[in-house]
Every structure is written in structure tokens, then in C-alpha cells.
Amino acid sequence: MNRYTPLLILLVLFSFLLSSCTEEEEIVIQYWTHEDGKRGALEERLIAEFEIENPGIKVERTEFQSSELIYKVSSSMEAGLGPVLFNLSSEVIPELAMSGSLDKLPDGIISADDYIPGAFDAVTYGDNIYGIPLEYTNWCLYVNTSMLEEAGLELPETWEDIRDISLLLTEHDGGIITKRVFDFRYPYYLSFFIPMVMQLGGGLVSDGSFIVNDDAWIEALSFMKEWGPLGDNLGSPTLLNARSLFNDEKIAMCLSGLYQEERMKDMNPEFYESPRWKVLPFPSFEVALSDVSASSYLHFFMVNEARSEEEKMAGWKLASYFASHADEYLEEVGLVMPLKTIINGDAVINKPYGSVFIDDLKRSTPVYSGPYAMEIQDLIGEAVESVMLQGISPEKAVAQLRASVSYLFI
Amino acid sequence: MSGALSGKKKVRKNKIYSIERKQARWGFAFTVPCLVFFAIFSFYPIIYAFITSFTNRQAIGRNYEFTGLENYVYIFTKNNGGFPLSNSIRATLVFTIGTFVPMIVVSLILATFMMQLRRDRYRGFFQLMYYMPAVLSSVVAAAIWMIIFDPRGLMNQVSNFVMHTSGVDYNWLVDPIMIQVSTIIIYFWKYIGYFVILFITGLASIPPTIYEAATVDGSSRWHTFWRITLPLLKPTTAMVSIMAMLQCLKTFSTQFMLYQGGSPRAPIDVITMNIYFTGIRNGRLGRASAMSIVLFVIMLVFTYLQLVANRSSEDVEY
């Protein structure tokens, strides 16, 4: 044995001891969130500032695809390895809250009075609040006005207008679409399809029973059937999402939130600065019985109940730090936090077409966030896609949907 | 003298015994990590899934109760929120039969063709070309094929050319029948090379002297293939067919990716996908575990049937 070997071993052991000492003092917040364009850059900057202000806390931010985040969070929590802090949208919260997986928002972290009424409804169970709002979103109709002007067409107001414009401008090579004019936001059916059903006098749930007013559902599904490949062939769930094409001026219309503007600015600044686009209210049917816009949804910061008290408190501290920079979220990312100062102030109104979004919010209803919301959304998707892609009759699809939803509760 | 001889025999016997024991000890030492790995990552989850299948356990629930056979009764009698297990069994069987039978036949033909190539570099080239898709992840493979199956993609162009049509959308990702064909094509393309390599290994192990003897006896190539190659390749065929079948029964990512891309779920809702949706998305771990046990039993039965079928005909040895 070399005479320096014991010394080396001692050095290695000492360094391990030192590192373990520092690890004990440092609180690590694993923060899981969904991919969201420029929000990543903003939050990385805020995290760096937060870490300087709180030397004992280190933040590890991880992004997932939005469709996968809920399953990553729930399965990791089940395995006892969930993150300290995460954000999820309102429709996926009930199961987590009711299973006792979420930490209660401690007193004094934020002032609920600073938020608009109803901002905490989706995370309030009993007397407890389980989250801090990250964003409050509704969708309106983005229109590339130059494409319509070139064809001598007026701006659309109704779903029928959109269908007529699409019938005129959609390009086909035989039965193959080569250029679309508008397409829906599959698979977010709770956000755009339920409002369409509501405009026709139907609804998702009323007095505990689901799929309200068959006629309204059948009419809305018939519209989708005509829209799809087996009807007028104007769009399909299998094609690239319309909002991605809009920024590149490859589609005339799409549904999106205020955040789309910041993405446009980022991806195609020339188009963003030009007068070639507009935002219009969420369309309605000509025969609409109810004036309803796209459902609004909220994303919340939440904290994992299973973590230590120090970690949980650090997680809430970071979430409230993010919330205290609401103006930067709006300015840099286009995300609206439901704070009174944001919603009632000038900041949103001063954004291009900000007033359209605010006005539409007034005629919107919150997205369904009751039990099995995600599963119900999947089932509505199956119903819509079965009429669009498989030629199932709307009547049969509605009956199947009702039966499938009822099975969820067995 | 005889005493000395018996003494030598004893020493020899002891030596053999000790060498065997030594080898066995090393063999055991090398096998232990694998056994431990299998026990932790395969055997334990199987047992755990079996136990969970008798409970009403949910993904985000803290408490659960023993419910007996309730989950099994449910998955065989109810429609499971619009996606019954019976449809999943149908989708899995259609996919398995549609994929594994052509895959075995074609990979055998391709392997035989490659063995006929005189130059090694040609053979190497073809092996590389056929095997390349196998190293791709299933997700990447599905993404590539989704572009090919897109209405404006290559597949519609080829179909229109072959069918002498113009501008017809064959709905590769949309039509209930075509979407099943699409999943079969993707899987076939991805794994054919892997099974070709296995068959080539089997073909290479057949002694060339047998072929020489057959040639001297005046056997034609066709006759040689049916009377010599195929019978001698039986162990390889059995192994490849079982492996291919099990792999097909476990298929998931291809169907899942296509569904994520907007294709309808019901036609391609294979058992593994139903397990994923029931367990992870809907949080019904008990039901999902019951489904996975059903899949396990199906795989067990099919494997047994194949082994019996392979054993029933006369074995050929050389």
C-alpha cells in the first residue's frame, strides 16, 4: 500500500462529509411545469433572482409536454417521488385535491383579496385553498385579414361564416387538403366544443347528469361531421395544429389565447408588427340560443403534500414570488394572472386586441373541472372524432358518449 | 496394484467433481445478478400487479380495499368507459396475426436471399439496411411514418400511382381499417431486420456439408430448401416466431403515437394501450392490473401452444 493512500482516503471521506453537510442545509425545490414558449426564459431569470434572495434554496426547473405533465405528476406522487412545486390546469385538479395529495396554501403567502372573484374556485375544497393561479386563459379567433381581403371576403362572426369562407378558400388536390383556412383546437374539447354545444342550448353537466340536451349535441356534432374528411373535408384532428401554422401565415384563422401574440412576435416579428392580422371574439352559431364564448381555464401552482415542511414552505415561497411578477408574465409571455390589478388595469387592454379577450371573458364559463374532467374530455374527443373520421352518426355518438361517461362513475 | 488404481480413480473423480463444482460456482456467480435483476424488475412487479388486480386501488388514492374478482368481472362485462377489453383483445389479435405471420415469412425469405449472395459486402450492406430501423426508437419510427401517411405524404402518392387514381386520400391515419394497416406496416418495417439477422444466424449454423451432399445427390434448390433448410431451421423458427409473437402482443408505442397524432383510438386500442389509459390516465390501477394479468395469461397460452406445435412434428438433428 502506498504511504499516501491513507491520506487520500481521508481526503475523500472529508470531502464527502463536507458535501453532505452543505446538502443538509440546502433546500431543493423540484419545480415541474409544462413547455410554454417564452415562459421558460422568464422563469429561469426569476429563479436566479429568487435563489440570490434566498441563499438556502435551490430550484430545479423541469419542463414536460403539457399533455404529459399531469400523468408525470400523478404517477411520481404515487411512487412517493413527486416534485415539490408544479403547475396544472383546473380540469385535472379534483382527483389530486380530494386524494389529499396537495398541500394547503399557508396563511400570509398571498392575499386572496388581490385576485378577481372566482379565481380560486377550482382549488378550493371546504375551507382550504390548494393553489396559486398562474394563468387565466380564454381563446379568441385570430384572423389573417390579408388572406380574406385578397379573396374579397368579410371578417367572420359565426361558425357558419367560418365554414363558408373555408368552403371558398380551402385548397384540395382531389380529396387531399393542400391548404386549410381554419381548424379547431383538437383535442381540447372542453375549451372549444362544449361552448359550441352550449351556444345551441346544450351543456356538459346539469344537476348531476351529463350530456344535457341531445339535440344540441347532435347539431354540434353534425357541424363537426360536415367539417371533417367525410364531409366537406375542411380540416381534421390528424393534421398539424392550426395555431402553429398561423404564425407562419400558412392558415387564415385559428383559435388561441393572448399568449399567441408573444409567440407571433418571437417567430414572425414582421407579421406581428403588420396590420395583416386581427383578433375577433370567439364565434357563435347563427341560431345560437346562448351567448357563450370559449371556456376559460386557469393554471395553478401547487405544492406536494408529501414533502417536508421546509420544502413545502420553500415551494409556496417560490410560487408567490412568481405571482408577484404578474406584470412581467403579461408583458413578456402574454400570460394573464387573474389579479385585479392585471384584469382591471390597463396592461391587458394595452396589448394588441387585449380588450377583445377581456370582453370575451365576460361571456365565458369556466372549463369543467369536476370529477373525471380529463377522461370526459377524452370521451368527447372520441365522439367528435368518430363522427368526423369514422362516419358514425351524431345520434349514435351522443348515445355512446353518455353511456361511456356514466361508466366512469361506476 | 489394484489399490493404487482405485486410489488414482478416486483422485480423478474428486478432481472432476471439484472442477465441476468450481465451474458451477462461477456459473452461479454470473447468474446471480441476472436473477436478482429479474426478481426485482420482472417477478416482483408481476406478483405486485397480481395482488393489485384484486383491489380497488387508484393512482392518486391513499387507501384501497380488497375487492376479490370485481375488476376481472368488470373488464370482461362492462365497456370500461367506452373502451372495452374485448375490443382491445380484438385489436391486439388483429395486429399480432397481421404482423407476426408476414414478418416470419418475409424475414425467412430475405434471410435465405441474403445467404445466397456470394459477396460478403453485399450481404453486409443488405443486413445493415434491413437492420437500421430496428435501432430507431418506436416513437421516432412512428413520427417518420406519420409524415409518410399524412394526406399529402408519400403513401398517398404511391397509392394513387399504384391504383391509377388521382388526388384520392386513402386515409391512412383516419379510416378504422387503414389505421390498423398503418400500424402493421410501421411495426413490420421496424422489426423485419432484427428477425432477418436471427434467421441468418440460424442458416449459417447449418453445416455446408449437408448442402454439398444434397447437391451431389442431385437435389434442386427448391427441394433443398424444403427438405433440408426448413427442417434444420426449425429451432430458430420456433424461437423467432415466439419472440415475434410476444413482441407483437406487447406493442404500445406505435399505436400510442398515432393516437396522440389525432388518429381514432378504438381501432388500435391494443391491450397495452388500454392498460395505460385505464391505469395512468384514468387512475384505475386495480383494473389496469387485472388487464395486464389477462395479457400475461394470453401470452402464456400462445407461447405454450407454439411450443406444443413445434414439438409435435418430428425433430431433425444433424
Image (cartoon, coloured by chain):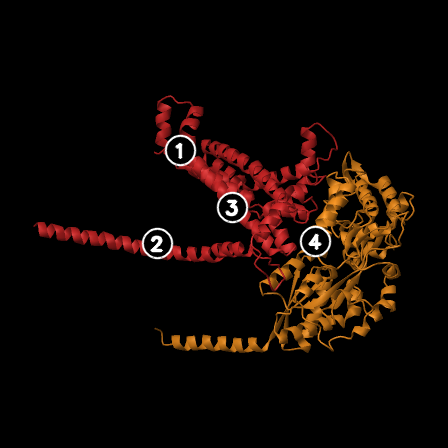
Looking at numbered disc 2 in the image, what kind of residue is underneath it? Gly
Please state the horizontal and vertical placement of residue B70, each as a whole percent of the image. 59, 52
Which quadrant of the rendered structure holds the N terminus of chain A?
bottom left
- Percent coordinates x, y for residue A352 in the rendering: 86, 60
The image shows residue A376, relative to residue B210, as above or below, that is: below
Given residues B202 and A368, the one toward you in this image is: A368
Q: What residue is at 31 percent from the left and 54 percent from the top?
A: B24
The chain letter for the residue carrying disc 2 is: B
Labels 2 and 3 in the same subunit: yes
The amino acid type, in three-letter code, at marker 1 is: Leu
Task: Name the mark nearer the viewer: 2 or 4.
Answer: 4
- Quote the CA–CA distance across marks 1 and 3: 31 Å
Which residue does the numbered mark 1 point to in the structure image?
Answer: B232
Residue at horizontal 75 percent and vertical 44 percent from the top = A399
Is circle 1 on the same chain as circle 3?
Answer: yes
Would you call the spot at circle 1 few (<14 residues within 10 Å), some (14-19), or many (20 or more)? Answer: many
Q: Which chain is in red here?
A: B
Mark 3 = which residue? B297
Of residues B195 and A71, the one drawn nearer to the viewer in this rendering: A71
Q: CA distance from mark 2 to mark 4?
A: 51 Å
Callout 3: chain: B
Asked if the residues shown at circle 2 and circle 4 are in contact, with their CB atoms under 8 angstroms apart, the answer is no
* Same chain? Circles 1 and 2: yes
Residue corresponding to mark 4: A375
- Residue at which label 2 appears: B27
